[in-house]
Image: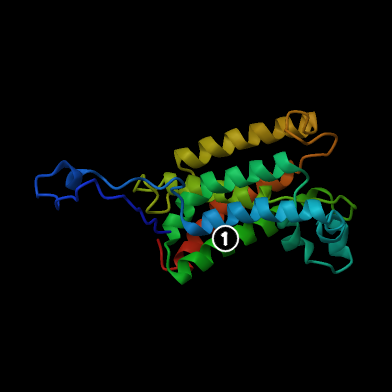
Amino acid sequence: MHAVHFEAPAPGGSQPPTPGDPELRRPPPEPIVNAPWPVVTLTVAIVGLYFLQTQFPFVADLLAFSPHDLLQGRYEGLITSQFLHGGWPHALMNAAFVLAFGAPVARFFGPRPGGVTAFFLLYLVCGVLAALGFAAFHWGQYAPMVGASGAASGLMGAAARLLGGPNANGGRVGPLLSQPVTGMGLAWIVINLILAVTGGAFMPGAGEAGVAWEAHLAGFAAGVLLIGPVGWLAGRR
């Protein structure tokens, strides 16, 4: 996004700056949100779609994912559930995760159409695999699940691979067992084991609802594993 700056002329007119003028050496202002537009789009979509959900609460029952759906041949919930949330804290937390971990991943893929497509594809596939990971632990059960946490965890895993690459600013995919991957992975496992034991008591806005920690871990693993192949398909290494 390009910002246009308007300045009122000084009284009596102004002279053009000379080559040695400090104004010419002043760096341009930094944007308020320094993130690629696909990441900003996802972040705004999470918040905006949850606002719409609050106006039409019945959509949560229709579009949530449940492992029982797979036995009935209904697979659309694998995608639609990623755009639903259980409350404002849930939606805002996932939006923050996407903004934080999606930025390096989107920069890795680049702004061209192929790179943007690869970014959104990675996000959605990680979300699908996260839901399938949840279903593996609750096979056949009617256990509705909503949220972008699995997809956001996938971006976290992908970002960890990039942080472990030869270029520390995220320009190359690093090894599967680099220090950022193992460190972030172990921390994420511990956090989610705590959530599994406490039932989400420490999660803002969770109330009595359970936390799909299985989806979080499956999404992280999917991001770690898929950033390389998806990057290869997008022409990145």
Against 141, is 100 above or below?
above
Three-letter code, disc 1: Leu
- Per the image, the residue denoted by label 1 is 122
Left or right: 182 in relation to 54: left
Whole-percent x, y for residue 163 in the image: 43, 44
> At x 58% / y 64%, what residue is drawn?
121
Whole-percent x, y for residue 192 in the image: 69, 36
Secondary structure beneath label 1: helix
Q: Nearer the viewer, residue 77 or 173?
A: 77
Left or right: 58 in relation to 120: right
Q: Quadrant of the N terminus?
A: bottom left
Q: Which image quadrant is residue 208 in?
A: top right
Whole-percent x, y for residue 38 in the image: 52, 59
> At x 54% / y 47%, what residue is drawn?
99
* Count of number-bearing discs: 1
Q: Looking at the image, what colour scheme do you see?
A: rainbow
> At x 37% / y 53%, what residue is drawn?
171
Against 235, is 149 above or below?
above
Q: Quadrant of the C terminus?
A: bottom left
Left or right: 192 in relation to 146: left
User: In the rendered image, is residue 176 in sight?
Assistant: no
